[in-house]
Amino acid sequence: MTTSDAQAQSPQSSTGTASTGKTSGEENQAGPSSESPTAGFDAAVVEACEELVEQYRKGEIAKVNAIIELGAIIRPVGTVSKEVGEQRTAGYGAFVKQLGYDSIEAFVGDTVPPKIRVSSSSVSDESIPALSESQLLNRARELAQLNKPVKSYIGMGYHNAVVPPVILRNILESPAWYTPYTPYQPEISQGRLESLVNFQTMITSITGMDIANASLLDEATAAAEGMVLSFANALHKKRTFLVDEGVAPQTLAVLRTRAKGFGINIIVGDVSKGLQDETIRSDLCGVLVQYPDVNGSIKDFGAVANAVHDAKALLVCATDLLALTMLKPPGEWGADVVVGNSARFGVPAGYGGPHAAFFACADKLKRKMPGRLIGLSRDAEGKPAYRLALQTREQHIRREKATSNICTAQALLANMAAMYAVYHGPEGLSRIAQKTHALTSILKSLVEKSGYSVVNPEFFDTLTINVSGAAKTAEAVHQAALAAGVNLRRIDDQLVGVTLDESVGLEDVIVLANVFASAASAPAVSPLNLPSAGTAIPAALQRTSEFLPHPVFNSYHSETEMLRYIYHLQSKDLGLVHAMIPLGSCTMKLNSTSSMIPLTWSEFSNVHPFAPKDQVRGYLKLINELQDDLCKITGFHACSLQPNSGAAGEYTGLSVIRAYHESRGEGHRDICLIPVSAHGTNPASAVMAGLKVIPVKSLADGSLDLEDLKEKAEKYKDNLAAFMITYPSTFGVFEAGVQDACKIIHENGGQVYLDGANLNAQVGLTNPATCGGDVCHLNLHKSFAIPHGGGGPGVGPVCAAEHLAPFLPTHPIVPVGQEQAINAVSAAPFGSASILLISWAYIKMLGGDGLSKATAAALLNANYMAYRLKDHYCLRFKNANGRVAHELLIDLHEFDKAAGLKVTDFAKRLQDYGFHPPTCSWPISTCMLIEPTESESLQEIDRRIRKEADDIISGKQPKDNNLLKNAPHPISVMTLSDAEWNRPYTREQAAYPVPSLKEKKFWPTVSRIDDAYGDTHLICDCPSVQETASDHH
């Protein structure tokens, strides 16, 4: 009987103290009890304990396990759901009464439309039993032990990274780094912005390109973005994209999925030969090559680049950062776009992710480049400061005109990779690369000595070995490898792949060599007589240019220096460790420490995504449990965890809908109706899936215009594919007519895609299936507590009704879908698999009851905030009962008219209060969208700055020189001399608007940043040695 079995048999109340009402300390002081040892415990608990004792007596379980499980049943350790329910009961009671209700149930009844409510048993402790923290960690350990500790040399873009402990402990495991949001408020984000500039600089310097973004989701999706950029660069007039035969198969699969929506024709083969075909050349928009390729070969693509450019197309190159420290960089032989995975720079494999992909391009393409870009600007004092640059490219602004639906980056992983480069520097990276290459060269000599032939004589770290001259079959080699505790790449019956990395030492090479020797019945390899290492990189392709000369990569090579640099940067950033982050539509809830702990256990972190399934039984069991729980929560039949962002989930869900229509002979359906109140990525995702977007109006009260929807659904009924709806809408209300809207779509032949970005308002109270949806995506980094990481990672699972389930995505290496499945949408079969642990743990510790309580708490917090603000600000939308959902939209237009105050002025002043501002100017330009989540308390919610605005309206403060217009006020401003202080308010008013800030205050590190200057003077890399020197003089 497992711990979870015991928990499932015992009601939640039984985990508390005995019914005497005394604490455990009082019981001890009262002396021995004359009652039965089981007195006061629930009968189910007694039964579970007796069963365990009997199992131990029969020898069915070990004593230590019996003790652990008994403790888990009777120990008074509260579950997370209990804490949610008990710690804040008093506070929530006060909230409820102030809102005019006798109970939270009555409040929920007025907030969530009754006809979409689900049974309380659908998400309860019966359907999802709750575990305590100790039980959860025990369960995680059980699953971890089901993963076999086999070392993988499979390669294919994934490596056994060595994470420097100073980075592991102080970035990956640090809430100061993993709890902030995307740096949309740069004055309180300068630390990670600087680190992301380090990442961009690292990429451009190593690849030889002009500019790089701040990371993408994975290598395969980055390559797909390169393909779409090539298509856009050809003005959508040329549709052929040529892919070299050496490109990784998972990348090719993702390209095929993405190409379908754009009508791009993919041709795979030898690109040199393909470029000689005039038919291909005349319609060519781009070419993708891999350097080195998936089989380890190093080819000179210089002539290919010239031929591609002669055809007025773009050359995209997928590459490896460590290899480029020894290879001529793509920017020097003509690549236009360079992509890849930075994970071997100190980011664990994690069964596929999350990892930070990179995307670099030529300067001429910078305004078409997808993803986030960090640039240098200046603040109000003229001092340099970083910010997100060229934000008008983002899909929230361009909507259906966007060329990409990229909504996030992989900021936390990009920061880790950047810090790895900072820590090792160019010399350290070169040493690692040279060691890896030398050991690969030695292995080549040793396997050849055993009678094998290496197919690729030129290589960096990967060998493709033909076994036919030595072993009977490739399978014989693989069996010998498994016996030695290692995985090799399976190619076919004659070929085996081996990829080395930083983690490999000479003893590992000897083990590998003896695997091949054993399969060939050749003499064993001795460490006493090893061949010398040579170079296998062609002279013409050896790197001669320097890389990473910038001071930041040549200054912090001791642990002391590195630790201080990390802490210096993190001191500049506001995260959930400092204050609430009430960003609307972003759900910034606090992430429990206990849910993060298993993440870095080696049994989970050191697993290759293409490892055999019998080696990852723990991962697969955890994944199945999470999928089952998400299906219970959404009401749907099946779930795919492959999409590695919310936007990727949107795109996947729409692709599933298209595949469904095609299976019914209705592939012509290509119209997607999208309300103006939908999530910002929806229109861009629809376009990516090959759909034409038709907007649907909203009424004055923010609700969907059902008449407009009906009119357009009927107008396009012959071609209607889908309707995308965000629920609750981004206007912050539950719309009573959601089921009616879905019925309209179904009656006209379409399918309903329900955007799960706001699922935090639904869990346990309603669900997408009940609302009328056919498919939805979820944001595990919102509703299910994966930290936002300063702008990534995230996971965007897709849940689907039974009729759509057969079309959920599969994978070319690890099949995970059904026969009708669409191609892969991510490089790894389960996307960013390692962080699924966090959401799994969150759900298990809350249990069904706790999840439902958390939803009610989120709704209550938002409505209490609306109640507190309604007399001071214009609450833009609410339902017929005066209630908002989990977020609220306040309109600041009146302040612009009366005092010239913009949304930005309020946002920057909130920074002086130690707040992270809400979402600004979206979804309406004059509004703030506020989402407090269930994590926040009354003390945080009560702050406000209305009085300061009134002082400007009344004339007490001038309109052009006041507390809001000059905000924020960093220390550099506060220390201005009296002569320089030309402001009609005191320093104390500026810095300490409420007394509590004198004891605890987070300081912005720069004053207000000039956005326009940053875009017109675009600088996206680190200062050079010369620039640094001039700054110091």
Image: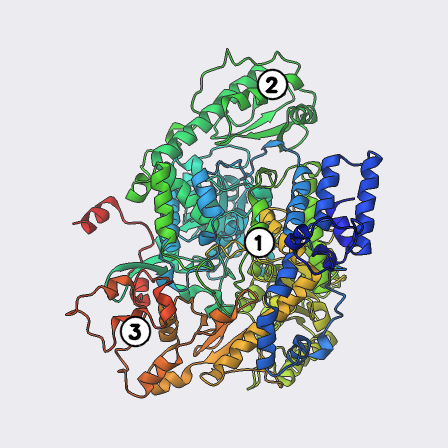
Q: What residue type is labelled 3?
A: Gln
Label 2, label 1: how far apart the Cα atoms are: 39 Å
Q: Which amino acid does label 1 sit on?
A: Asn
Q: What residue type is labelled 2?
A: Asn
Numbered mark located on residue 514 in the image: 2
Which secondary structure, mark 1? loop
Q: Quadrant of residue 306?
A: top left
Q: Which of marks 3 and 1 is nearer the N terminus?
A: 1
Q: Earlier in the sequence, mark 2 or mark 1?
A: 2
Disc 1 designates what residue? Answer: 644
Residue at 43%, 28% in the rendered image: 537
The answer to whether the residues at label 3 and label 1 have Cβ atoms under 8 Å apart is: no
**x and y percent of residue 457 in the render?**
50, 25
Label 3, label 1: how far apart the Cα atoms are: 45 Å
Which secondary structure, mark 2? helix
* Category of crowding for the residue at label 1, using alpha-carbon neighbours closer than 10 angstroms: few (below 14), some (14–19), many (at least 20): many
Numbered mark located on residue 134 in the image: none
**Numbered disc in front, either 3 or 2:** 3
State whether residue 957 is above or below residue 966.
Answer: below
Numbered mark located on residue 989 in the image: 3
| Residue at the far left in the pictured view | 979
In the drawing, does residue 433 fall left or right of residue 584? Answer: left
**x and y percent of residue 545 in the render?**
32, 36
Residue at 74%, 56% in the rendered image: 14
The answer to whether the residues at label 2 and label 1 have Cβ atoms under 8 Å apart is: no
**x and y percent of residue 865 in the render?**
52, 76
**x and y percent of residue 836 in the render?**
61, 51
* Category of crowding for the residue at label 3, using alpha-carbon neighbours closer than 10 angstroms: few (below 14), some (14–19), many (at least 20): few
